Image: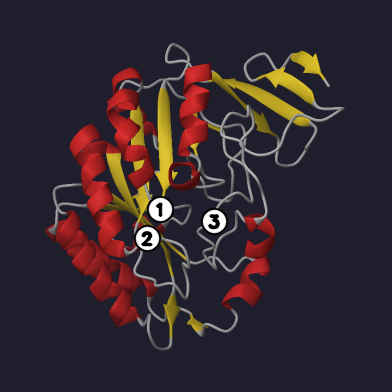
């Protein structure tokens, strides 16, 4: 079983204590994001978990625990570093700080398992022009040279609910995606970094862009990790191997304006209280909840 921690929230940045407590307990309860009364009991012992993929914008809080986790589990990181400021990513640490954290992660687990995400790519008329974003990408590539071997990128998807959040930022479309991707590929290649795209098959735009998934079959094979193909992708174009996500939507406090994982306002989410000792990342078991074993899907408890 491959664990995703997490596509739904930033566990490393905001829920490290909860995660470490769940490792100690050997399991976590995860509420189904659609059928809210269904709860999965996900085993987290090292004899069951083949790999953990950490997905984060800020791995710094998890760093002190990495030697222990790396000793007991096979792990990899996908760390997002983008060129946007507080106007787009209000609570994400400064780029320089995240770059240093990525380097720290790489020293512990190796550059092959430390993946950089440069996504989403978005442009505005002023501050984040295509030239400005490309220059920032080049600067990051130079600083991350030798600390990562791969960069995953994608262009902004305009989810309907993001219209209001980004509506006053002057977002502009890319007038030449092919040209922009080719410039990125030349920069990345000169710094020893492979490019791959998330969900969009942008490999046709440039031969240096790899047509591989974010959590891909080839990496799992090279690391000796058993994997299976998902019965259905998490989104259109996704080719990732099957993972079990232990996160919870609406529990991330980065407040990025383009985010799909938060549906409620920042002020509403700030009132949430978290218990790091809870079986669930957020909330408690309620009357009518069905707790099922993640493997057999057989009901084990009824509340």
Question: Do residues under tags 2 and 1 come within 8 Å of each other at their CB atoms?
Answer: yes
Question: Residue at point 48% right, 68% down?
Answer: 90
The answer to whether any part of residue 149 appears in the image is: no
Task: Residue 253: give its label.
Answer: 3
Residue 269 to residue 4: above or below: below
Q: Nearer the viewer, residue 175 or 13?
A: 13
Of the two numbered discs 2 and 1 on the same chain, state the one appearing first in sequence.
Answer: 1
Q: What residue would you read off at disc 2?
A: 93
Question: Residue at point 41% right, 35% down?
Answer: 53
Q: Nearer the viewer, residue 285 or 44?
A: 285
**Gap in angstroms between the C-alphas marked 2 and 1:** 8 Å
Question: Do residues under tags 3 and 2 come within 8 Å of each other at their CB atoms?
Answer: no
Question: Relative to residue 177, is residue 41 drawn left or right?
Answer: right
Residue 211 to residue 89: above or below: above
Q: Residues within 10 Å of mark 3 (few under 14, many from 20)?
A: some
Question: Residue at point 41% right, 39% down?
Answer: 54
Res 109 quadrant in image: top left
Of the two numbered discs 1 and 3 on the same chain, state the one appearing first in sequence.
Answer: 1
Of the two numbered discs 3 and 2 on the same chain, state the one appearing first in sequence.
Answer: 2
Where does the image place residue 31, in percent across and percent down from the top left?
69, 34
Task: Residue 280: give its label.
Answer: none
Q: Residues within 10 Å of mark 1 (few under 14, many from 20)?
A: many
Residue 263 to residue 135: above or below: above
């Amino acid at each position: 079983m491959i664990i995703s921690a997490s596509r739904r929230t930033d566990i490393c940045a905001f829920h490290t204590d909860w995660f470490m407590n769940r490792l100690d307990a050997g399991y976590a309860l995860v509420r189904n994001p659609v059928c809210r009364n269904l709860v999965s009991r996900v085993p987290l012992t090292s004899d069951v978990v083949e790999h953990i993929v950490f997905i984060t914008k800020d791995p710094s809080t998890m760093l002190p625990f990495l030697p222990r986790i790396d000793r007991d589990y096979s792990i990899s990181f996908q760390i997002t570093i983008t060129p946007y400021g507080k106007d787009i990513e209000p609570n994400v640490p400064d780029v320089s700080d995240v770059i240093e954290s990525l380097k720290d992660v790489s020293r512990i687990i190796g550059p092959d398992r430390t993946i950089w995400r440069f996504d989403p790519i978005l442009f505005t008329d002023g501050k984040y022009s295509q030239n400005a974003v490309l220059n920032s990408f080049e600067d990051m590539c130079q600083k991350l040279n030798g600390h990562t071997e791969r960069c995953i990128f994608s262009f902004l998807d305009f989810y309907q609910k993001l219209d209001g959040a980004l509506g006053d930022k002057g977002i502009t479309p890319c007038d030449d995606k092919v040209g922009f991707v080719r410039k990125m590929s030349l920069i990345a290649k000169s710094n020893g970094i492979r490019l791959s795209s998330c969900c969009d098959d942008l490999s046709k735009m440039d031969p240096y862009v790899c047509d591989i998934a974010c959590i891909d079959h080839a990496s799992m094979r090279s690391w000796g990790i058993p994997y299976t193909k998902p019965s259905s992708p998490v989104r259109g174009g996704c080719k990732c191997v099957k993972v079990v996500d232990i996160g919870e939507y609406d529990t991330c406090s980065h407040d990025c304006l383009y985010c799909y994982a938060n549906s409620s306002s920042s002020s509403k989410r700030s009132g949430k209280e978290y218990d790091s000792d809870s079986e669930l990342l957020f909330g408690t078991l309620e009357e009518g909840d069905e707790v099922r074993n993640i493997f057999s899907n057989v009901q084990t408890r009824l509340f």
